[in-house]
Amino acid sequence: MIDINTLHIGSHVLADGKRERVRGLDEDNGLIIRFPAEYVLTSDVEPIRITEELLTELGFENTSSTRRIVYTKGCEYDGLWVEVRNHKDRWEVFVSNNDWDGRMAVRYLHELEAFLYLTTKTELIKE
């Protein structure tokens, strides 16, 4: 189950075993809108774990070393740059956007999406 307060419109979750984009939220009733007029209870929705395969699918480049699993997207010295490092049961995300840097620990795709959107106003998955 997902805490509805950790989602935003545009987040991706697992519903009926498929990745779905959240199109609306009804926090009062614990509902997620995935298609117009189609509601899903938050208890029927699962978070999507971040994996190396998922990061590759999302356009991240494997820049790992012998000591650490690392995936990056963008250019460190020119505009938006995102680095995701594996730390056992979680991932640490570093975001650099011109004059701003930040980091956060995440486990799930919707957490990565929310952090990136809140800090840079950039959607990770453009649909």
Image: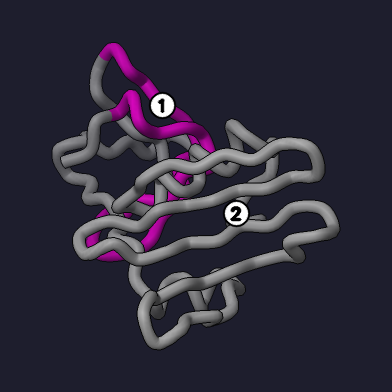
Q: Could you tell me which residue is drawn at 40 percent across and 53 percent down? A: 92
What's the magenta region?
A: 4-28
Q: Quadrant of the N terminus?
A: top left
Q: Could you tell me which residue is drawn at 64 percent across and 40 percent down? A: 101
x then y, percent, for residue 121: 69, 36
x then y, percent, for residue 37: 43, 34
State how many labels appear: 2
The image shows residue 125, relative to residue 66, as above or below, that is above
Q: Quadrant of the C terminus?
A: bottom right
Kindly state the secondary structure of the residue where label 1 is placed: strand
Along the viewing direction, whichever of 8 and 23 lies nearer the viewer: 8
The image shows residue 42, relative to residue 71, as above or below, that is above
Q: Is residue 54 left or right of residue 29?
A: right
- Numbered label attached to residue 124: 2
Dot 2: few (<14), some (14–19), or many (≥20) neighbours within 10 Å? Answer: some
Q: Could you tell me which residue is drawn at 72 percent across and 65 percent down? A: 74
Task: Give the farthest residue toward the bottom.
Answer: 66
Name which residue type carries label 1.
Answer: Leu
- Numbered label attached to residue 25: 1
Q: Quadrant of residue 5?
A: top left
Q: Is residue 82 visible?
A: yes
